Image: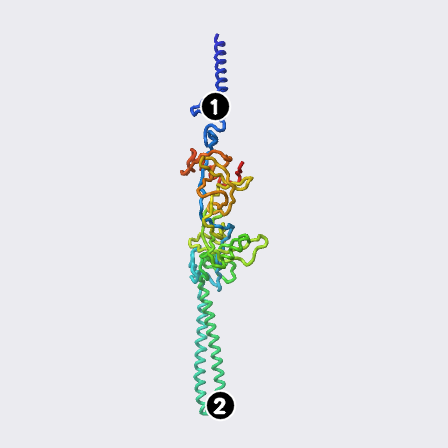
Amino acid sequence: RSPWVVAALLAVGSGGLWWYKTHPVDSPSGVTTIPGTPPVAGTGNRRFGGGNNVQPVSIQLVRRQDIRASVNAIGSITASNTAVIHAQVSGVLQSLHFKEGQQVKAGQLLAQIDPRAFQASVNQAEGSLTRDKAQRDNAKIDLARYRDLLAKDAIPKQQLDTQEALVRQLDGTVKVDQAAVESASLQLSYAHVTAPISGRVGLKQADLGNVVQPGDANGIVSITQTRPIAMVFAVPATYLTQINAGLKINQSMEVQAWDRFGKTQLAAGRVASIDNAIDPTTDTIKIKALFANADDALFPNQSVSASLQLATLSQVLTVPQAAVLRGSQGYYVYVVNPDNSVNTKVVKPGTVDGGWMAVEGDLQSGDKVVIDGTDRLREGAKVEVIEPDSKPGAKAGKQGSGSKRSSKNASAPASSSAQ
């Protein structure tokens, strides 16, 4: 009888399993589900469409504040002045008096070339000068004597004229000797290589013991003046009128230099000058700005993001940039009403400054606009306001998920649309 008993038990078990899978069961949360089936939208976690279609969102208040009107561009850092230090005389490089990369001042000694040959030339020129001065002085004494004798009719006048000519000739010789001394001294000074400008020295291009010459292509070292340092960038020619107006009244037009990702400000400077013509191929005008660069944050040939401040809009209506969406009706925002329902308000976007956008529309200061959770909203939908996560690294909970979604929506608000 054992096979019959086993068959009966299997039949009873199969029937019970079929009943369990096809009949609803009440869960502890009060939500009726069918075992073995996926959860239906509107049940379970409220973060993903809770009961009664209440959507969790994050908000910020509309406010009035000053907004800086600016234009952004890509800038290139250039040194105010650049000098390649060449030897002005040929000779053996005896010593270097700088460290690569250090800041030097104008007139500071950089290198020493063997000066002995040039010192010998100076001594030789000075000797010739001393000899010719003595001859000239002797000729002047004779000239004075001849004048006395001529007054007594003791010598012919021709002899006096000859002596006067000799004195003038020796005066010329002395002047030539003086020029030779100055030339030799100048050559000797060239053996002491000094910095023509203040700035940062680069890597040395000549080693000790080498013979350096004025014709060397790379010279001894190069100096770039980085305090102050310049930045050149181009902006659309439509801004030329505003820039010219500011320069004519000596307005201090601020320029900010940011890293290429636009996240870290490197330095702040002022507009120094503009180019004398518009580039017809790009319809842009080049602008030069100067930065103090006391901390050496900027380097020549560095590529940065430039932000030129044109004006300041005073106490304008602003909303977070993440709240502005774009749909078939144009740009709009979701406003949370006192009854926790939302409706759309069409706005006209304006200048953006620090994540806040100046707008025009049917908004009031203090209105609540949605900045996170807009992808699931519809006109008249009910919402629950949640706070963004204040603890970095949170892995679970409503606040953690809200914080993650906020960065996503802020990066691509234009993808959302009203329906």
Tell me if mark 1 has few (under 14), some (14-19) or many (20+) residues whose alpha carbon lies within 10 angstroms of its own.
some
Q: Is residue 206 visible?
A: no
Looking at this view, name the residue that lies furthest to the left: 391
> Which residue occupies the foreground of this view, 313 or 202?
313
> Which residue occupies the foreground of this view, 158 or 343?
343
Q: Is residue 174 visible?
A: yes
Residue 291, position as x, y percentages in the image: 46, 55
Looking at this view, name the residue that lies furthest to the bottom: 153
Residue 33, label in figure? 1
Above or below, comparing residue 254 to residue 20 in the picture: below
Q: CA distance from mark 1 to mark 2?
A: 146 Å
Secondary structure found at label 2:
loop
Disc 2 marks a residue whose amino acid type is Pro
Q: Quadrant of the C terminus?
A: top right
Disc 1 marks a residue whose amino acid type is Thr
Q: Quadrant of residue 110?
A: bottom left
Q: Which numbered disc flags the more N-terminal residue, 1 or 2?
A: 1
Above or below, comparing residue 114 to residue 10 in the picture: below
Tell me if mark 2 has few (under 14), some (14-19) or many (20+) residues whose alpha carbon lies within 10 angstroms of its own.
few
Residue 416, position as x, y percentages in the image: 52, 38
Above or below, comparing residue 12 to residue 162 in the picture: above
Looking at this view, name the residue that lies furthest to the right: 281
Mark nearest the camera among 1 and 2 is 1
Which residue sits at x=42%, y=53%? 295
Q: Which residue is mark 2?
A: 156
Residue 83, position as x, y percentages in the image: 48, 59
Which residue sits at x=46%, y=69%? 184
Secondary structure found at label 1:
strand
Residue 201, position as x, y percentages in the image: 45, 57
Residue 116, label in figure? none
Q: How many marks?
A: 2
> Which residue occupies the foreground of this view, 241 or 121?
241
